[in-house]
Amino acid sequence: MDEDSESRPHRTPDEEKIRWGLMLLDFEKKNNTVSRNRVLQGGSHCCKTPFEELKPIKLCEMKVPMIHRGKYLVCKVVGKPYSILGIAKPSPIIGVNTLIEDLNGDVEEASAFNFPLKPDENWLCPGTILLIKEPWLQYISESKTPFIRIESPSDIIFVDPADEKFLIKVGAEKWYISMSKDAEFWRTKANECYKNEKFEEALFLYERGIRCNPENPVLYLNKSAACLKMDAFYMAFKAAEIGLDKGGNREKALFRMGQAKYGIREWEDAKKYFTEALNEFPKHASVQVKRAADRLAEQNHGKYNFKKMFDDSKKEKPSLDVADYKGPIEIADIPGKGRGIIATTDIKEGTILVVSKPFASGYKQDLPEEFIQFLPDDLPQHILQVINAMQNLQNNPEKGIEIYKLYAGDSIAEYEDIPFGKSYTEIFVASKNCK
C-alpha cells in the first residue's frame, strides 16, 4: 500500500471550514438522517510504538495512502463531528467524522471508530486538541479525497489545553490556554461534574487539579471514585493507592481499593482490603466482605446460589454478580480436531464444568431508536457487544489478554502485547464468541 503512495492533496483551510459548516446545516435541515457512507479500504492498524519513541509530522509532509509509522500528528478539531446519521454516535460500523487542523493551519478530514456509544456533548467539540499516533491517511472509497482513519481509541491522546508542559513538549504551546492553577478550584468543578454523573469530565478535571497540586491526596481519592463509576478499575486502584500513600482518608482509600479489586475480579485481594477497612472502621464494608467471600467460594469450589442467579436472570437487563469457575476440564489442542475441551478426570453426573461471565454484553434497547432502524434485527446487540468490549478494554487495557485468548477464526493469528483497539481482531472474536 505504501509503495503506491503520493503526496497528500492540499486543501484550502478556509474553503474546507465553510464547506464543513454548510454540510452540517444540510444534515440539520434533513433531520439528521442523511447518510454519508464512507467505504473503507481493507486492512487495519493500531500503533504499538510507545509515544516517547514517535516523531512529529505535519499534514503537508504526509503521503496517501500511507500509515505514517513512527510518527504522530498534533491537531485540533475545527469542525463539529458527525456520523452517517449526522450525530456523534460511533460504532465499529458507523464512525465519527470530523475536520482537524494541524500546527501549520492545514486541514483534513478524520474518521474515528470504536469510541464510546454515548459521548458527552463536549466529546470532539471544536477546539479539542488531539495527538494522533501513526496517522493513517487513505482515500475515501475510489475517490481522490483523503481522510485520516483512526481505528483504535488508544491511537488518540486527548490533550488538556491547560497542560502547558505537555503542549511545549509536542510543539503546540501556541494552543495553550492559561487557566487557574488552584487545585481546589478544579476539585470543586470536578465534584460538580461527578454529582451530575459526568464522570469522564470529572476525571479530566481531577487530573487537571492533580497537575496543579500533585501532593493533594483528596484529588487522588476523588479520581479513584470517578474511575470506579467508569468501571476503570485498574486506574481506580492506583489512584486510591496513591491517595493512601499521600496521607488521604484511610477508610475511603481501603474501601475504594477493595472496590477496584472486586471489579478486576481479584477476589482474594478485594476481601483483604474490605476486611482491613471493616476491622478499622466497623460501620462499613461488612456487606462487601461477604460478597468477596461468596465470589471466592464460587471460584474455588463452584458453590453458587442458583436460585438468586435465576431470579437475577429474569430482570430486564440481567447482570449476574458471580465469579468464574473451572471444574475438571481444560482447553487443549486435540490431534486432528483442533482446539477443544477435554476432561481431566472422570466426571460424575451433575458436576459443574464451567461458569464464565461474558467479557461484554449488549441489549438492543440500549441503542437509540433512530440508529436501530438502519440495522437488521440481530445486529444492534452484536454491535453493542463489540462497542462494550472496546469500552471495557479502553478503561482496563490490562484485560486485553482475556479477549485475545479467545478464538477469532483460523485466519487470525495469535497476538502478543497488543494494545486494546485492534478492532478487526475484536470483531472476529465477537463473531465467534457472541450469542
Image (tube, rainbow, N blue to C red):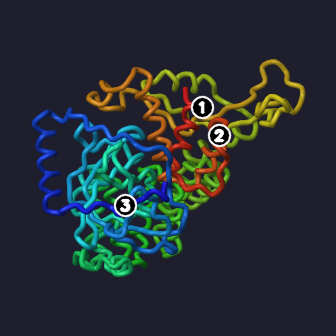
The tag earlier along the polypeptide, 1 or 3, is: 3
- Residue 283: where, in percent of width, then height? 50, 53
The residue lying at 31 percent from left, 45 percent from top is 143
The tag earlier along the polypeptide, 2 or 3, is: 3
Q: Mark 3 packing: few (<14 Cα in 10 Å), some, or many (20+)?
A: many
Residue 225 visible in image? no
- Quadrant in which residue 110 is drawn: bottom left
Residue 210 visible in image? yes
Q: Mark 1 packing: few (<14 Cα in 10 Å), some, or many (20+)?
A: few
- From this view, report whether residue 413 is shown above or below residue 74: above
- Residue 74: where, in percent of width, then height? 34, 69
**321 vs 247, nearest the viewer:** 321
- From this view, report whether residue 202 is shown above or below residue 434: below
The amino acid sitting under disc 3 is: Leu
Q: Are marks 2 and 3 in contact (CB under 8 Å)?
A: no
Label ID, residue 203 = 3
Q: Which residue is denoted by mark 2 in the rendering?
A: 406
Callout 1: SS: helix
The tag earlier along the polypeptide, 1 or 2, is: 2
- Residue 102: where, in percent of width, then height? 28, 68
- Calculate the distance from the C-alpha at mark 2 to the C-alpha at mark 3: 32 Å
The amino acid sitting under disc 1 is: Lys
Q: Are marks 1 and 2 in contact (CB under 8 Å)?
A: yes
- Residue 62: where, in percent of width, then height? 37, 65
- From this view, report whether residue 345 is shown above or below residue 242: above
Callout 3: SS: helix
Label ID, residue 432 = 1
